[in-house]
Image (cartoon, rainbow, N blue to C red):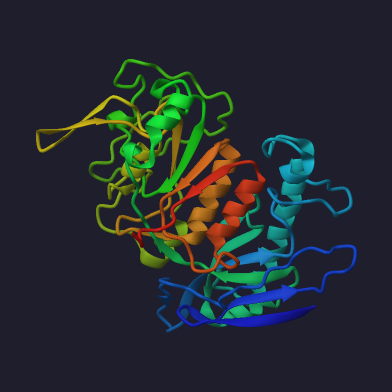
Amino acid sequence: MRRVLHVAACLFVGAILLAQAAPTAQQRRFVARPLIEGTSISTTAVKLPDGQRMVSVVVKFNAEAVATYRGGLAGLPATSPVVTGKRRLDLREPHVRAYVQYLQSRTRSFRRAAAAVAPLARITHELSIVVGGVAMQVPEQDVPALAALPGVSAIYPDEALKIDTESSPAFIGAPALWAQLGGQGRAGEGVIVGILDGGIWPEHPSFSDPDPLGRAYAPPADWQGDACEFGSGTTGDAPFACNNKLIGARRFMATHEAVLGVVAGEFLSARDDGGHGTHTTSTAAGNAGVEASMFGTPRGTLSGIAPRAHVAMYRVCGPEGSCFGSDSAAAVQQAIVDGVDVINFSIGGGQNPYSDIVSLAFLDAHNAGVFVAASAGNSGP
């Protein structure tokens, strides 16, 4: 097995290290190489008191994630719905749990080995359902040592992406689609939409149950989530009990905090303190019949594209609009576990899908049976 070292000019020397075995005739699997070697667009290294630089990376094991595992290990049958033929990845099935436990044992082994070669490194996220590895903060000079550990196939830079915006129902032709579904009052019925963004303002009428037209929501049958993270103690961050419209909310910002810290007054919960997450959630699946106004001036009646869908917020972005890839990957993993049908991602993408950790997590989500709607960016006509 040979290891190839790539240079991430904007992040650190040795940001991506790929270990690749030549495929045998029996394997015959496509192996992708990065189109752009070692790109990173806005990640900031953290300087330690002794002058060392801590960088954010994602370590990929030489094992497939649960959502993508196609079999091949003795006693561990395939878990990916692409192979099993199931509609969705079901983490309650015994053979799926067995493979999860296998990856957890790989993670424990890696922890021990990493502690020996990079004692200051720390894991921020374990990624077994998607990616198949861990996210870490690690001293820059220790990255090659981590890459040389047995069982490591790649180390990717953890990029900080930026939030994007969305469009109105009329602009994209939603009314015509509503007609095909039996009208606006049925659009999205029973679907669970997971939003990865900067949080949500739960008291907004776009997320009320019943909706402003008086129609109540039934509990979603396939929802497995149990978190509703509001009320962190920060001024303005009031507790909130989720309902059958806003069915869950979590915060995934461990890497963001490690790199950029916490801004004074920031909500340490899933509550939106920038406005973007509330906007995109209401655009995707906000209630119909919401009367909008600005400074007392009526601005019309609002509706989301799928107004009868249930929504779950996974906060991955800070108030300044930065969203780290490993935080987003961890949120994708949790969204799969929770049972979402759709993931909405109104955040700018990385430059290279073969080394962008969010793109890789989305591929795993697709393999798990989840539809991913990702922003194409803010640029262009």
Q: Nearer the viewer, residue 350 or 72?
A: 350
Q: Position of residue 307 (x, y in %)?
A: 39, 29
Can I make out residue 79 in this image? no
Count of marks, rendered view: 0
Q: Is residue 280 above or below residue 219?
A: below
On screen, residue 167 above or below 112? above
Using the rendered image of the protein, determine whether residue 81 is visible from the camera's viewpoint.
Answer: yes
What x and y, as percent, mark residue 247?
Answer: 45, 30
Q: Where does residue 67 sit, x and y in percent of width and height?
A: 68, 48
Query: Relative to residue 329, is residue 350 depicted above or below?
Result: below
Question: Quick check: 71 left or right of 263?
Answer: right
Give left or right: position of 336 versus 182: right
Residues 364 and 305: in front is: 305
Quadrant in the picture for residue 183: top left
**Residue shown at the point (71%, 51%) measured from the top left:** 68
Q: Position of residue 349 (x, y in %)?
A: 46, 61
* The N terminus: image quadrant: bottom right
* Of residues 245 and 305, the one drawn nearer to the viewer in this rendering: 305
| 162 vs 112, nearest the viewer | 162
Q: In which quadrant is the C terminus drawn? A: bottom left
* Residue found at x 75% / y 72%: 150
Q: State the residue at coordinates (32%, 31%).
A: 303
